Amino acid sequence: MIGEPYVTLTVLGVLVTGVMAGVFCAFSVLVMRGLAELPPAQGVAAMNAINTAAMTPVFMVLFAGSAVLCAVIAVVTFVLWPDQGTVELLLGSALYLFGAFGLTLVANVPRNEALLKLDPGTPEAAAYWPTYLREWTMWNHVRAGASAAAALVYMLALT
């Protein structure tokens, strides 16, 4: 079993990546499905409102704070190189940093920005909406899976 400071950092890592996995999963299986049932103008307007509302300090601390914690775990692991759990700690960090946080920046945020530029009632918005739903949700599934995998791998480091 890993020792301190890894136990504390890893338990926190399990918690935050697990919470983020739940957030991403709920969004994919509940929110996006509900938005897909709306007429395009309403769906676009609702998603834009959600994306704007997501920029709250609470969510940003959880989302970005999870990335910072995963980066700290990776750096501490590289610097101290523990006898046990090294692979799990580095893999868990990489899964969240690249598969959730990084993917958000390169896949989901650009789609959100493109959607935000469209007036919900226009034919352009209606044409883009099905593509947005399909692509955004697909990448969100990946974020959910990567976050859940990070939590699982971090848990394995504790054994």
Image: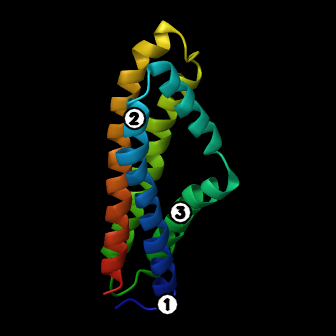
Q: Which residue is mark 2?
A: 136
What residue appears at the point 59 percent right and 19 percent down from the top-left corner?
117
Q: Earlier in the sequence, mark 2 or mark 1?
A: 1
Above or below residue 5? Residue 53 is above
Q: Is residue 47 left or right of residue 139?
A: right
Residue 22 shown left or right of residue 112 in the figure: left
Where's residue 7, x and y in %?
46, 86
Please tell me whether mark 3 or mark 2 is closer to you in this view. Answer: 2
- Horizontal and vertical percent for residue 21? 40, 59
Q: What whole-number distance in Å separates the C-alpha atoms at marks 3 and 2?
A: 21 Å
Q: Nearer the viewer, residue 34 or 26?
A: 34
How crowded pointer 1 is (Cα within 10 Å; few <14, some 14-19, many 20+) is rated as few
Q: Looking at the image, which is closer to me, 147 or 72?
A: 147
Q: Callout 2: 10 Å neighbours few (<14), some, many (20+)?
A: many
Res 54 → quadrant: top right
Callout 1 amino acid: Glu
Read off the residue under disc 1. 4
**Looking at the picture, how far across and down is residue 67, in whole percent?**
52, 59
The amino acid on which the numbered mark 3 sits, given as a three-letter code, is Ser
Q: Earlier in the sequence, mark 1 or mark 3?
A: 1
- Spatial CA distance of label 1 from label 3 is 19 Å
Looking at numbered disc 2 in the image, what kind of residue is underneath it?
A: Trp
Q: Secondary structure at mark 1?
A: loop
Quarter-wise, where is residue 130 in the image? Answer: top left
- Is label 3 in contact with label 2 (beta carbons under 8 Å)? no
On the rendered image, what quadrant is the N terminus found in? bottom left
Which circle's residue, 3 or 2, is located before the other in the chain? 3
Tag in front: 2 or 1: 2
